Structures are given as C-alpha cells and as structure tokens.
Amino acid sequence: MSVAKIMVGIVIVVYGVILANLIYYMFQTKTGLGFPVWIQVILGLCFLAVSISNLKHRHYIFGSLFASAVVLIVGSVVVNMMYS
C-alpha cells in the first residue's frame, strides 16, 4: 500500500470523525445550524443536486464532500424538528 493511499485513508477517517462529532454535538446541545428549516431544506436539496452531478462526472472528492454536507444538514433539520 502506498503512502498516498494511507494518507487518503487517514484524511477520510478524520473527516468522518469530525462530521460525526458535529452531528453528535447538535443532538447534545439540541441546536441546529441556526437557519430556518425551510432554508436548510433548500440548501440540502442544492447540495444533493451538486453532489449527484459531481458523482456522475466522476469528481468523487467533491461529490463526497457535498454528500457529507447533505448529511450534516439532514442532521440539523432532524434536531430542529425534534427540539423546536
């Protein structure tokens, strides 16, 4: 296994841990991103469309980054709906 693949793996793991921590923190503090839910839904749909477009064009890095933004926004909407 090359050094580049190991570094990519480490970056993916660290990014996943940070994303999970952000979502966990939102559930702990019972607060979302601070925007109204309708704006978050529109933002999530836009990120989803960009993510799908990037994945179709084989831009996997950008597609996965936008997909993780969709996950974060979905977590925020769920927190806002549960605790508001």
Image (spheres, rainbow, N blue to C red):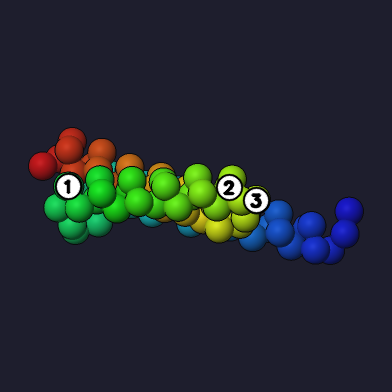
Query: Label 1 to label 3, Cα distance in Å?
Result: 30 Å
Query: Label 2 to label 1, Cα distance in Å?
Result: 26 Å
Q: Nearer the viewer, residue 4 or 61?
A: 61
The reply to whether the C-beta atoms of the residues labelled 2 and 1 are less than 8 Å apart is no
Mark 3: few, some, or many residues within 10 Å (few <14, many ≥20)? few
Question: Disc 1 designates what residue?
Answer: 38
The vertical placement of 84 against 8, above or below, is above
Q: Position of residue 61 (x, y in %)?
A: 61, 57
Query: Label 3 to label 2, Cα distance in Å?
Result: 5 Å
Looking at the image, the residue that sits furthest to the right is 1
Viewer-side label of 2, 1: 2
Mark 2: few, some, or many residues within 10 Å (few <14, many ≥20)? some
Q: Position of residue 62 (x, y in %)?
A: 55, 58
Q: Position of residue 71 (x, y in %)?
A: 41, 45
Viewer-side label of 1, 3: 3
Q: Which mark is residue 55?
A: 2
Q: Which mark is residue 9?
A: none
Query: Residue sitting at 33 percent across and 48 percent down?
Result: 44
- Residue 33 as seen in the image, left or right of residue 7: left
**Mark 3 secondary-structure assignment:** loop
Q: Nearer the viewer, residue 70 or 2?
A: 70
Query: Residue sitting at 59 percent across and 45 percent down?
Result: 56
Asked if residue 78 shows in the view, the reply is yes
Question: Disc 3 designates what residue?
Answer: 58
Looking at the image, the residue that sits furthest to the top is 82
Q: Nearer the viewer, residue 58 or 1?
A: 58
The answer to which of marks 2 and 1 sits earlier in the sequence is 1
- Residue 7 as seen in the image, left or right of residue 56: right
The reply to whether the C-beta atoms of the residues labelled 3 and 2 are less than 8 Å apart is yes
Quadrant holding the C terminus: top left
The vertical placement of 35 against 28, above or below, is below
